[in-house]
Image (cartoon, helix red, strand yellow):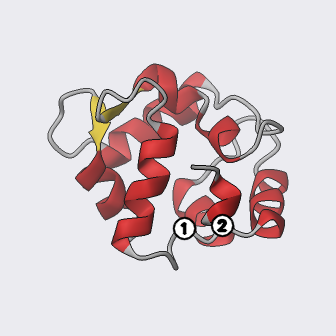
Amino acid sequence: MAMKNLLKEDDIKKALDQFKAADSFDHKKFFDVVGLKALSAENVKLVFKALDVDASGFIEEEELKFVLKGFSADGRDLTDKETKAFLAAADKDGDGKIGIDEFEALVHE
């Protein structure tokens, strides 16, 4: 499912533009600007599935690095520092990856 079916294209562009600079990514602000926080838990889980590129049921660190590209091909790669901070914020069970419930909880925290 394409992100533009769940989120407004203008909001995606605005969010990506806001975090264009390396090491500027803040997941809470990004989720708010892109419109994820306003989505239902069910729709947030659809976004998760779109970001789970290998359909493993988890967003692993390697997939997380490219998370902005999941919203738009124009998105930049996250830096290693941003990727690790994002993973640390979401990975509540410490298994080194983000599950669907962890992602939904992070979006709506």
Amino acid type at mark 2: Leu
Q: Mark 2 points at which residue?
A: 7
Label 2 neighbour load within 10 Å: few <14, some 14-19, many 20+: some
Q: Which amino acid does label 1 sit on?
A: Leu
- Residue at (56%, 63%) from the top-left corner? 31
Where is residue 91, by image quadrant? Answer: top left
Residue at left offset 81%, top offset 41%: 21
Q: Where is residue 106 in the image (x, y as percent from the top left)?
A: 36, 59
From what the image shows, is residue 76 above or below residue 3? above
Mark sitting on residue 36: 1
Number of residues whose C-alpha sits closer than 10 Å to that of mark 1, classed few (under 14), some (14–19) or many (20 or more): many
User: How far across and down, in percent of the image, does residue 33 sit?
Assistant: 68, 69
Q: In this view, does 5 lie above or below 2?
A: below
Q: Is residue 4 above or below residue 21?
A: below
Left or right: residue 81 versus residue 54 is right
- Earlier along the polypeptide chain: callout 1 or callout 2? 2
Q: Quadrant of the C terminus?
A: bottom left
Along the viewing direction, whichever of 102 and 29 lies nearer the viewer: 102
| In this picture, residue 105 sits left or right of residue 81 | left
Evaluate if marks 1 and 2 touch, with contact meaning CB atoms under 8 Å apart: yes
Looking at the picture, tell me which residue is in the foreground, 41 or 102.
41
